């Protein structure tokens, strides 16, 4: 547990980077600090491991004032991940990851062994271990950065925009893996980002900072979207927050319709006969949806091939959220949203109106609970 | 001219005794290496200190560059005149020559070492402190090794200057390959002068090649760019394998 007690950082020129912040960071959870640039979120993070010294207030880790421990010793017990990874270019991947164990006096062999385990944990193949950072892609470097921070298994991890320097697709997969990793590791994580979507996706708790180092609101993601504390927070969390809040409402209980389907390779005539309103859903041999088929485009084709399939339309998981279900229904060319189970096999379809009914029911239930 | 030069060169008389080529070459090499070692000790230590602490950057910007503008020959005579009375004869000749060579060699080593430390990726330095390295550990484990390529470029340019300037030692009676130039000039023996000039150039080239070899073996591969241009994984391979994949990447492994 990390506690900010009226923490202030004022620079000699009078600039206030962090203004009397009180914040409670619970153990084993992800706390995201989010806000526009210059709002003091990074400074707040860096004050936890004393990379920046507060000019007022105290920061307590498990009840101990960080001010009472030697900075180097304090930092060796706290994982630290930064935006551009900051890997040591002259060391191989495995030696980068072994850095903190070796600082702590482990024998080199044991430290390397630990490093290899960590590389596997963050999803890097062992062949990469003797490469140098310049030989890795941005996403791989960031994984090495995370592995390095986990080196001595610290209970606390500080992460300063770790995923913002990689492209959006890689970022999303890094985020998903990060959440999966955290489920196993249960670290106390403080995570800085300027991206509200990332904050809402990753945070158990989100702290919104405002220019001038002022902490505007601390709340769980659903509460933040449902009930912003002021105009600043409301503006910052964005206009489509009603839609985004659906991410937190489970999709279970949706009334699914049975959907007639054909398999890839089926006879064109069969596809035409099976179709409803001119469209038929095409599955692979494991009943995983491959795409919708507009049967009027089957002229001259003997069988259903993957090339004629319509690629628009998302697929939602029945154990996912209503946001995914609504998106599947809205994006489908037929108005019938495709719902699958955990392994991706078809369960059925749902229309937008049915999703909306479910949304209203969920809202009424939430109202009743209050 | 070429014929006379070759004749001079192949004459066995010129290959033996105190005035022989091997002895002059050894003298020249001795002054050069000694000067480089002393200059490196001073230049690298100061460069690391200034680069790490940020204190005394004026020394690099102003002082070191001003030193480069000093005329070597004038300085040599000045220092010799001052020291000759104060010291026994040989030492009074030797120290000034060494001093001039060291003064000449410190600036390139100092400025390039400083630049090497300054060029260390700020993110790597931040990460080093953030992981709990002390200032000293950051210097020794991160900044110094990362500065190595530039340190070597400073050493190599210093070595070239030392080898060519060490010919001046002959003018204060210290021998070296400069003697071939000086003796040749005094009796208008041009083949001998040419031989001296060629030998100095050859020595410089050999030393340059030696240092380049040392650099190749002592600079970590991750810093040299060798292999770095190859084997850069594409982001596409991450897109297709977004999960905890342990499959080998299918690009070539870097040169070992």
Image (tube, rainbow, N blue to C red):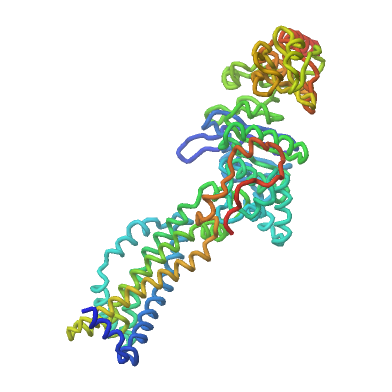
Q: Is residue A322 left or right of residue B195?
A: right
In this view, B111 is above or below B167:
above
- Which residue is more in the foreground, A263 or B177? A263
Taking depth in this image into account, of A15 and B181 the one nearest to the observer is B181
Quarter holding the N terminus of chain A? top right
- State the image coordinates of residue A75 (x, y, percent, origin top left): 65, 49
Using the image as rendered, state which of residue B202 and residue A59 is in the foreground. B202
B120 over A319 or under it: above or below: below
* Residue A36 spot, x, y in % from top left: 54, 28
Q: Is residue A92 left or right of residue B37?
A: right
Q: Is residue A292 visible?
A: yes
The quadrant where residue A35 appears: top right
Instruction: Report how many numbered discs are placed on residues in the image.
Output: 0
A331 with respect to B147 (left or right):
right
Quarter that holds the C terminus of chain A: top right
Q: Residue B52 in the image: state x and y as whole percent.
A: 48, 56
- Res B5 quadrant in image: bottom left
Q: Quadrant of residue A323?
A: top right
**In the displayed structure, would residue B46 be above or below residue B101?**
above
Q: Position of residue A262 (x, y in %)?
A: 77, 18
| In the depicted structure, whether residue B243 falls above or below residue B48 | above
Left of A67 or right of it: where is B91? left
Q: Residue at x 71, y 42 (%)?
A: B245
Report whether residue A370 is seen. no
| Of residues A215 and A318, the one drawn nearer to the viewer in this rendering | A318
């Amino acid at each position: 547990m990390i506690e900010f007690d009226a923490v202030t950082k004022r620079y000699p020129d009078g600039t206030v980077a962090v203004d009397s912040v009180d914040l409670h960071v619970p153990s084993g959870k992800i706390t995201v600090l989010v806000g526009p640039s210059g709002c003091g979120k990074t400074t707040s993070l860096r004050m936890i491991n004393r990379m920046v010294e507060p000019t007022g207030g105290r920061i307590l880790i498990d009840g101990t004032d960080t001010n009472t421990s030697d900075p180097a010793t304090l930092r060796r017990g706290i994982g630290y991940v930064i935006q551009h990874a900051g890997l040591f270019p002259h060391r191989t991947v495995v030696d980068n990851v072994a850095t903190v164990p070796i600082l702590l006096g482990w024998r080199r062999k044991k430290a390397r062994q630990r490093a290899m385990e960590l590389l596997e944990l963050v999803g890097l193949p062992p062949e990469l271990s003797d490469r140098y950072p310049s030989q890795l892609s941005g996403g791989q470097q960031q994984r090495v950065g995370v592995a390095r921070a986990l080196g001595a298994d610290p209970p606390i991890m500080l992460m300063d925009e770790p995923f913002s320097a990689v492209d959006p697709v890689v970022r999303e997969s890094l985020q998903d893996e990060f959440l999966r990793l955290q489920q196993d590791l249960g670290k106390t994580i403080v995570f800085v980002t300027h991206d509200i979507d990332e904050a809402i996706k990753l945070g158990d708790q989100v702290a919104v900072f405002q220019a001038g180092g002022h902490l505007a609101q601390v709340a769980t993601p659903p509460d933040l979207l449902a009930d912003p504390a002021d105009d600043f927070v409301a503006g910052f969390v964005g206009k489509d927050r009603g839609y985004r809040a659906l991410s937190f409402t489970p999709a279970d209980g949706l009334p699914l319709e049975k959907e007639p389907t054909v398999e890839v390779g089926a006879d064109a005539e069969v596809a035409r006969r099976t179709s409803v309103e001119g469209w038929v859903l095409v599955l692979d041999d494991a009943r995983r949806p491959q795409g919708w088929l507009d049967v009027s485009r089957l002229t001259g084709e003997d069988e259903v091939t993957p090339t004629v399939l319509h690629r628009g339309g998302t697929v939602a998981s029945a154990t996912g959220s209503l946001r995914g279900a609504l998106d599947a229904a809205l994006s489908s060319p037929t108005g019938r949203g495709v719902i699958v189970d955990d392994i991706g096999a078809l369960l059925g379809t749902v229309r937008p109106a049915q999703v909306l009914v479910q949304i209203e029911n969920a809202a009424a239930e939430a109202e009743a609970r209050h | 001219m070429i014929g006379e030069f070759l004749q001079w060169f192949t004459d066995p008389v010129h290959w033996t005794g105190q005035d022989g080529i091997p002895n002059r070459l050894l003298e020249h090499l001795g002054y050069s290496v000694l000067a480089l070692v002393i200059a490196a000790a001073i230049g690298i230590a100061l460069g690391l200190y200034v680069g790490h602490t940020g204190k005394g950057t004026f020394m690099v910007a102003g002082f070191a560059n001003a030193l480069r503008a000093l005329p070597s020959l004038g300085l040599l005579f000045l220092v010799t005149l001052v020291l000759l009375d104060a010291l026994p004869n040989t030492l009074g000749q030797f120290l000034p020559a060494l001093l001039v060579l060291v003064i000449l060699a410190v600036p390139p080593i100092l400025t390039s070492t400083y630049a090497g430390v300054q060029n260390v990726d700020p993110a790597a330095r931040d990460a080093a402190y953030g992981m709990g390295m002390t200032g000293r550990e950051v210097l020794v484990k991160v900044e110094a090794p990362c500065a190595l390529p530039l340190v070597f470029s400073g050493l190599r340019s210093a070595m070239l200057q030392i080898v060519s300037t060490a010919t001046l030692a002959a003018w204060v009676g210290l021998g070296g390959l400069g003697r071939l130039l000086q003796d040749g000039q005094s009796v208008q023996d041009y083949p001998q002068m040419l031989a001296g000039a060629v030998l100095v150039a050859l020595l410089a080239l050999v030393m340059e090649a030696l240092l380049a070899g040392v650099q190749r073996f002592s600079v970590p591969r991750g810093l040299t760019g060798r292999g770095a241009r190859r084997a850069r994984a594409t982001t596409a391979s991450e897109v297709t394998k977004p999960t905890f994949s342990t499959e080998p990447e299918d690009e070539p492994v870097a040169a070992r």
